[in-house]
Amino acid sequence: MVNKLKVAVIGGGAAGFYAAICVKENFPTATVTLFEKTSKVLAKVAISGGGRCNVTNGHTSIKTLSEGYPRGSRLMKKALQVFSTRDIMKWFEDRGVPLKTESDNRVFPISDNSQSITDCLVDETRKLNIEVIKSSAVRAIQPADHSIDLEFDSRSITFDKVIVASGGSPKETGLSWLAVLGHDIVYPVPSLFTFNMPGEKITSLMGVVAPMTKVSIQGTKLKATGPLLITHWGMSGPAILKLSAFGARLLFDAHYKFIVQVNWVDVQNNEAVREVLVALSSANPKKILSNTRPFNLPVRLWTFLIRKSEIDPGMQWINVGKKHLNKLVSTLTNDIYNVNGKTTFKEEFVTCGGISLGSIHEDTMQSRSCRGLYFAGEVLDIDGITGGYNFQAAWTTAYLAGQLR
């Protein structure tokens, strides 16, 4: 039976390519065919990380890694014990793609070019004689007794096993071909997006990065920490993207209209912030406020926050009274902005939702309703924060699916 094994992989992204490779590595005599509906493969890999490809995350703690998945955390905690970040890094490096881990734990190829990753995956499929067929969309899946038929526009092909790695769908209708097979669909909504703030004056600081912030959504328990980037439309950066991921469904329900609270210094104790300002004042009584920055805040941001506190940036510290000090502390620790809309983070669209994890066997990625059918990657209701988490979910679930257990 193994000698005659025919396997199809649907989807030419990271999960699809790696699943196909894993199948061929596990079953060398199998015939493996990968189908991609568009004319390009690995398109998302090519543009990720600003064209550098954020392959994975450098954390080695499975507990820490699993906490980076707003959806699928429990599955990933278990799955990462089978195939971890270290495993995928070793896989690429063993194939001549050296990697580096940056200070924020993002992992990139040393080349700083995503083509190093795409070339490696494509070359591996060629070495293993995996057929890659582009511009070939699967219209339906028809299970038989001991096989699965894939229906295309003008033909039907029979396979023993099928792995679906078709990626996320922005609409529930895009998953209807899988729903008819008995799979529950979690309604997809966007994740990893930036906040639009039309009318907020802070957008005049576009390009400024606050090094360490804590952001939260007013009226919820949603919080996130990290750098914050001010853009010409609002706010972005790791802290905002993390908040958008964990709040994806809630913010969708709010029609992306809400209030974000920003602690610009990530210090929760207001008295501690006050002490820093008092010490700054005592050490620099004759200096003007805008020239003496606390908490390593960027100059433009610090000046903006002084003005927002209704204080003249040209005032000397010696003239800063209790009322001014209280206002500064409040602005630094509890600044408020109105959000009205979102912008997708670059071109790296990520969805919250997909095939319900209750519809699969989590240790094998096999469908509960269709024997011989497996899932991998973003088509599942698994998504992570920015920083290599989503690619790791693709590699790990593809590895499990590729065992064909």
Image (cartoon, helix red, strand yellow):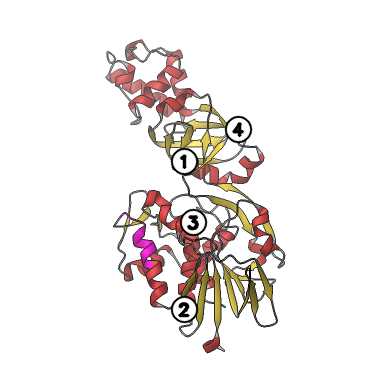
Dot 3 and dot 2 residues touching (CB under 8 Å): no
**Label 2 near label 4: C-beta < 8 Å?**
no
- Of callouts 4 and 2, which one flags the residue occurring earlier in the amino acid sequence? 2
Residue contact at pointers 3 and 1, CB within 8 angstroms: no
Image quadrant where residue 174 sits: bottom right
Q: Residue furthest front?
A: 154
- Tell me: 51 left or right of 32: left
Label 4, secondary structure: give it. strand
Tag 2 residue: 24
Q: Residue at x 59, y 40 (%)?
A: 221
Amino acid type assigned to the residue bearing label 4 in the image: Phe
Mark identifier at residue 404: none
Identify the image quadrant of the C terminus.
Answer: bottom right
Q: CA distance from mark 3 to mark 1?
A: 17 Å
Magenta span of residues: 112-120
Which residue is disc 3 drawn over?
390
> Is 241 covered by the magenta stretch?
no
What residue is rendered at 33% in x and 23% in y?
279
Q: Is residue 282 left or right of residue 144?
A: left
Indicate which disc residue 239 carries: 1
The nearer-to-camera label among 4 and 2 is 2
Specify which label sits upstream in the sequence, 3 or 4. 4
Within-10-Å neighbours for mark 2: few <14, some 14–19, many 20+? many
